[in-house]
């Protein structure tokens, strides 16, 4: 019978160093993919909201931010009034003017995503905005319908996103 040989302290330490190095390389990629997933979740919620808003406007003849009607058309989402901030990707802050529908959603990192859907006559246009804001509300966008991006009000807005 041959004697059993154990691992030396150097060998065990080397294994731990290699595992730590591999983790250091992989973790940033995992974290960035998680952030991208939460951003995409907020964007998808806004796309669904826009579809519901267009359908609702086709029934009412004008843009509407009726929370009950929107929740009927998009039951997976929670809609809040224009002055209530969105704190989750599936909680959408909404507002409407005579010609536009405004919606915002915050991803879990606090980044704000928004859209301004203009429904005028036979045509329709959508402006997509994203940025960091202390309060991710539809009321922030309401006075700025027709201006892209909204004037800086303590917020930093990035390049518009497109679905």
Image (cartoon, rainbow, N blue to C red):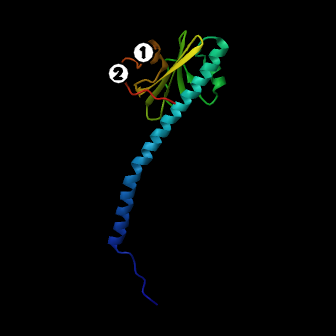
- Disc 1: which residue: 147
* Neighbours of disc 1 within 10 Å: few (<14), some (14-19), many (20+): few
Q: Residue at x 54, y 27 (%)?
A: 46
Establish if 102 lies above or below 44.
Answer: above
When asked about the image quadrant of residue 11, the answer is bottom left
How far across and how far down the image is residue 110, in percent?
Answer: 43, 31
> Left of 57 or right of it: where is 92?
left
Name the spot of residue 2 as percent of width and height, x first: 44, 88
Name the mark on residue 154. 2
Give the number of the mark in front: 1 or 2.
1
**Residue 121 vs residue 139, the one in the foreground:** 121
Q: CA distance from mark 1 to mark 2?
A: 17 Å
Quadrant location of residue 13?
bottom left
Relative to 82, residue 17 above or below:
below
* Relative side of 141 to 53, left or right: left
On residue 40, which mark appears? Answer: none
Q: Nearer the viewer, residue 1 or 39?
A: 39
> 10 Å neighbourhood of mark 2: few (<14), some, or many (≥20)?
few
Q: Position of residue 68 (x, y in %)?
A: 64, 20
Q: Residue at x 46, y 90 (%)?
A: 1
Residue lying farthest left? 10
Q: How many marks?
A: 2
Element on which disc 2 rests:
loop
Is 132 placed above or below 32 here? above
Determine the image quadrant of residue 124: top right
Q: Position of residue 133 (x, y in %)?
A: 40, 25
Circles 1, 2 touching at the beta carbon (< 8 Å): no
């Amino acid at each position: 019978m041959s004697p059993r040989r154990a691992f030396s302290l150097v060998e065990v330490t080397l294994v731990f160093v290699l595992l730590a190095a591999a983790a250091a390389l992989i973790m940033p990629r995992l974290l960035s993919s998680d952030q991208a997933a939460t951003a995409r979740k907020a964007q998808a919620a806004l796309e669904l909201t826009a579809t519901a808003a267009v359908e609702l406007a086709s029934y009412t003849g004008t843009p509407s931010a009726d929370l009950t009607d929107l929740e009927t058309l998009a039951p997976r989402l929670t809609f809040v009034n224009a002055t209530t901030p969105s704190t989750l990707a599936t909680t959408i802050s909404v507002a409407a003017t005579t010609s536009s529908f405004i919606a915002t959603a915050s991803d879990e990192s606090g980044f704000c995503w928004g859209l301004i859907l203009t429904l005028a006559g036979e045509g329709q246009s959508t402006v997509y905005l994203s940025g960091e804001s202390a309060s991710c509300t539809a009321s922030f966008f309401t006075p700025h319908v027709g201006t892209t991006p909204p004037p800086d009000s303590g917020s930093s807005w990035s390049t518009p996103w497109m679905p």
